Amino acid sequence: MRGGGAARSGEGLAVSQASRVSMQEVADRAGVALSSVSRVVSGHRDVSPVMRERVLRVVADLGYEPDILARSLRRGQTMTVGFVVGNIANPLLAEIALGAETRLREAGYAMLLANSMDDPALDSAHIRLFRQRRVDGLLLSLTDDRDPELAAELARANVPAVLVDRDAARYPGVAAVLYDHASGVERATEALIELGHTHLALINGPPASRPARERASALRRVLRRHPEAAGLVRSGAFSAQHGESTMASLLAQDNEAVPTAVIAGSNQILVGVLRALRRANVIIPKDLSVVTCDDQPLSELFDPPLATISRQPHELGEVSAELLLEQLNGGPARSVVLPTSFRPTESCAPPRQPARRRRGGGG
Amino acid sequence: MRGGGAARSGEGLAVSQASRVSMQEVADRAGVALSSVSRVVSGHRDVSPVMRERVLRVVADLGYEPDILARSLRRGQTMTVGFVVGNIANPLLAEIALGAETRLREAGYAMLLANSMDDPALDSAHIRLFRQRRVDGLLLSLTDDRDPELAAELARANVPAVLVDRDAARYPGVAAVLYDHASGVERATEALIELGHTHLALINGPPASRPARERASALRRVLRRHPEAAGLVRSGAFSAQHGESTMASLLAQDNEAVPTAVIAGSNQILVGVLRALRRANVIIPKDLSVVTCDDQPLSELFDPPLATISRQPHELGEVSAELLLEQLNGGPARSVVLPTSFRPTESCAPPRQPARRRRGGGG
DNA sequence: TGTCTGCCTGAGATCGTTTCCATCGCCCGT
DNA sequence: ACGGGCGATGGAAACGATCTCAGGCAGACA
């Protein structure tokens, strides 16, 4: 056997055998009261060093571990947070969940995860279930934030909640973390104009989607500041089909009306765009500069790597957890908006025949 | 006399206001015993229709909801399963988690999620934490399944466990769900040979990885059955760098030694391969057929869509949950191996100068 | 020396259920 | 008519912790 202090095989009680040791058993074995064991284990001040030592020894001997369930029942808090998520297989949401879980764990909370599979009824059901499990707080990435039943469930739950990547306008007193989709588009647009582009296009998602709306207005805002440039927005679904048909129709226009730079509103749209470009033998970035709003870090998969307007889902998750923790610690429901950023790559270059040169050296 | 429960003032208290209604209050209001309410709520048989009706009415009136915490404490089961996952941001694992959570929820279980961030110490820590929360079972996608401390933690937990996409050889009595990585590679190889390829290459992951080992031996096994074809395996990291340098070196060989078909061992490797091909102006599939072992469904992003050897992570998750449920219901620890499949696309075509034609018309 | 103060400790109530056990009618068979 | 069996109900003991409250004991001060 290994010599030295760590060896405690002698006691005879096979730790791995004992199914579960209760506080009462520790108390009996140590010859002290149950309440004293509780004080030692939960780290209260009012215990003498002798008592502490004595109890801790028995705790180690028996391999006692506190039962968080019983503790929760008595204390009225479970140190558990419920995360209702549309679909964890969505890479953006997975990264958010990772960030949130990490932060919550640091603070001693565990995270329950439930997928709604894009079914608003499941959203409500999960909130109800989480409530019955007495979670201390909720992180919600809801399917449909206009569901009235949901607001009721949420109110009944009566615990702090943070809407993750969703607007909280309909839920007074509930915090939210949102992306500022405009900032990334603004920066991308500025950069493209700076490169000399005067014909821009945004192949966008549906106007019903907040991100799509924000992106469209951001583009228009920048164009208003730059009379030398023009741009158009084509709304549709977040789908490859929309991307492909729209791109094809743009390419079919009169030569000088064809945009020299395109922003795709999602990776799905991008896929369609690339397909259309391939078919028309359009080369990136020689014939066309392309930027995409990525929902997963795929830029590197393309050649050239694609310039992206990107979010930081991990940070979003961390901030969501942080806001929830603030409320759990008694603070107010605070909301936060996170910026989106533009990461330029070689998929953006000056246009082939710049309508108007802004600088001498084009590179 | 603290917390005088029965003395709640206000008969018709707004439901959304009352923080929480206990079974005792329901009993008082209905004028029956606490235990009778319990029987009605938990659906026992021995209750008269009158009693049931009477209790259920009050339950509805007060908006009573059972406290799962207290129930768990008493019943000794929490209807909760812990999922320890390396990193939920890994798309494969996210999909697995989705499948597992869905199945578990159907069976009435909730899922706690913890990320280990590829840190074996965290694996153990999470298992310990889950044990203290008295989870009924564990799903484990471990970082390092050779960690001895982990085996000890697992034994102490003393609950059913299923290793997800990990080998259970070291943990007697623990179930496992694994991919059969060989079958997909075998099918892909057969298909390529069928197309007329005689020079194959597998740009593989590290031999320390079980998937990589299985793939290599599968390739060799098929080649042994087909003397007319030859192939080579290049082991290395699951990285773009390995893919790029290996592909470049393969292309630099004598013309007739250059493979006409390549299998990339992961998407990361694929990225490197594609980069090398681009640089050498090699066209898919005209000059080279390419297959990849995808860990996320990216095939569609490429043009042409890439042929893939694919797994079904969602199914893996479901099966994992199913095996765990079997154990939770008293069944034995059963293990399962899931096949991988080959999905051919236009990225595979007959070689340019087939060393030997197998059929007349090659499209 | 007596009393007061203050620190520790132990006993017991409590959190909200489930479940065992005893009781109480009631129906039925003989 | 009476005892046995049975179904429905109420009471109370768990489950495993936390926390309040009261009491014991020691040191200090008058």
Image (tube, coloured by chain):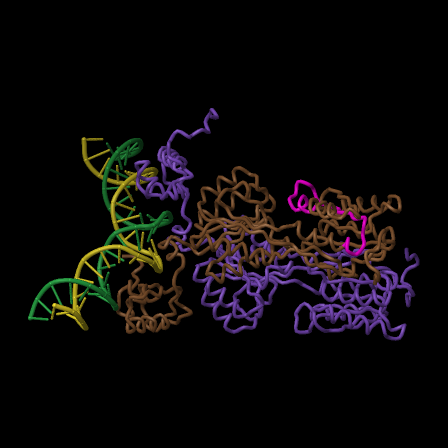
Chain colours: A purple, B brown, C yellow, D green
Q: From the image, which quarter does the C terminus of chain B lie in?
A: bottom right
Q: Can residue B200 be seen in this view?
A: yes
The quadrant where residue C21 appears:
bottom left
Say left or right for B262 vs B324. Answer: right
Q: Can residue A346 be seen in this view?
A: no
Residue at the spot 48% in from the left edge and 26% down from the top edge? A2
Asked whether residue B360 is drawn in magenta, I would say: no
Asked whether residue B204 is drawn in magenta, I would say: yes
Say left or right for D25 vs A160. Answer: left
Say left or right for A4 vs C2. Answer: right
Residue A195 % position (x, y): 85, 61
**How many labels, in total?**
0
Q: Is residue A282 above or below residue B242?
A: below
Q: From the image, which quarter does the N terminus of chain B lie in?
A: bottom left
Residue A277 % position (x, y): 83, 66
Residue A233 % position (x, y): 76, 72
**Magenta region:** B192-215
Residue A133 % position (x, y): 44, 59
D19 or A154, nearer to the observer: A154
A229 or A302, nearer to the observer: A302
B185 or B2, nearer to the observer: B185
Residue at the spot 32% in from the left edge and 36% down from the top edge? A29
